Structures are given as C-alpha cells and as structure tokens.
Image (spheres, rainbow, N blue to C red):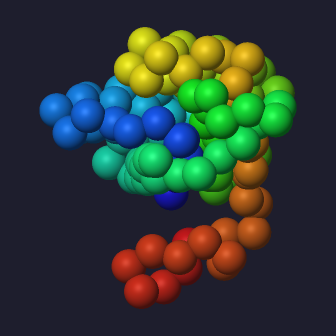
Amino acid sequence: MPLLRLVTNQPVAEERRDILMKRLSKSVANVLGKPESYVMITLEEKTPMLFAGSSEPTGFFEVTSLGSISAEQAQRFSAEISGILAQELNLPANRVYSKYVGWTDRQLWGFKGGTF
C-alpha cells in the first residue's frame, strides 16, 4: 500500500537501479512501520525537468500511503530519501522536492482487483 514514486532527470546505471530501488523500499517500510512486502517503488529516469531555471541534476519524489503520514515521518522521509538520492544519483538535497500523501479513505486505494 505505500508507494514511492521517484522522478529524476538523471540516468540510473542499470547495475545501480536495483540497489537504489531496494534502498528506497527499505526506507519506506522503516519510516512507516509497514511490511516491505506491501511497498511499491516506481522510477522515472531521464525525465526532462527544470528546477530554479536550470536543468542541472534534480529530482522529485512522493510517498503515498494508506493512513496518515505524520510531520515527523515526512521529515524522516525528506532526510533519508534525500540522503539516498545524494549517494546513489549525486542529487543535491537542495535540488529535490518531495510530497507526502496519506489516504484515510480505504475504498479509494485498490489491490488484488478490489479495494482496501
């Protein structure tokens, strides 16, 4: 049920892609306290992006999950995910935006051909 969507204008080396996505998955599960077996990660690389008038390395990530996401969890996500992106993609934290969405309306989140 948690989903982290990462969009970046940077290419991700094929041999690093799995490592990056697994690190993101573990972080999401850890911060939310949910089983990693429910975590989904999506990666959109080499996306044309402009930030602060520049096409220098940049990225955006959003975390969506059933239940609320607290201010403390959002802060942890911002720090942890930005750190991972700096290490794996050389994205400076001051060129990464993030967004956090908690869904409390369970029938608006689908799985296994139905809804929660």
Q: Residue at x 68, y 28 (%)?
A: 96
Q: Residue at x 49, y 23 (%)?
A: 85
Above or below residue 74? Residue 5 is below
User: Looking at this view, is 41 or 32 the one in front?
Assistant: 41
User: Looking at this view, is 5 or 34 the one in front?
Assistant: 5
User: Looking at this view, is 96 or 67 the one in front?
Assistant: 96
Quarter of the image that includes the C terminus: bottom right
Asked if residue 64 lies left or right of residue 97, the reply is left
Above or below residue 102? Residue 23 is above
User: Looking at this view, is 32 or 81 the one in front?
Assistant: 81
Q: Give coordinates of residue 78: x percent, y percent.
A: 68, 23
Q: Give coordinates of residue 37: x percent, y percent.
A: 32, 48
Q: Residue furthest bottom?
A: 113
Quadrant of res 66: bottom right
* Residue 96 seen in this snapshot: yes
Q: Residue furthest left?
A: 15
Q: Give coordinates of residue 67: x percent, y percent.
A: 70, 51
In this rendering, the count of numbered labels is: 0
Above or below residue 111? Residue 59 is above
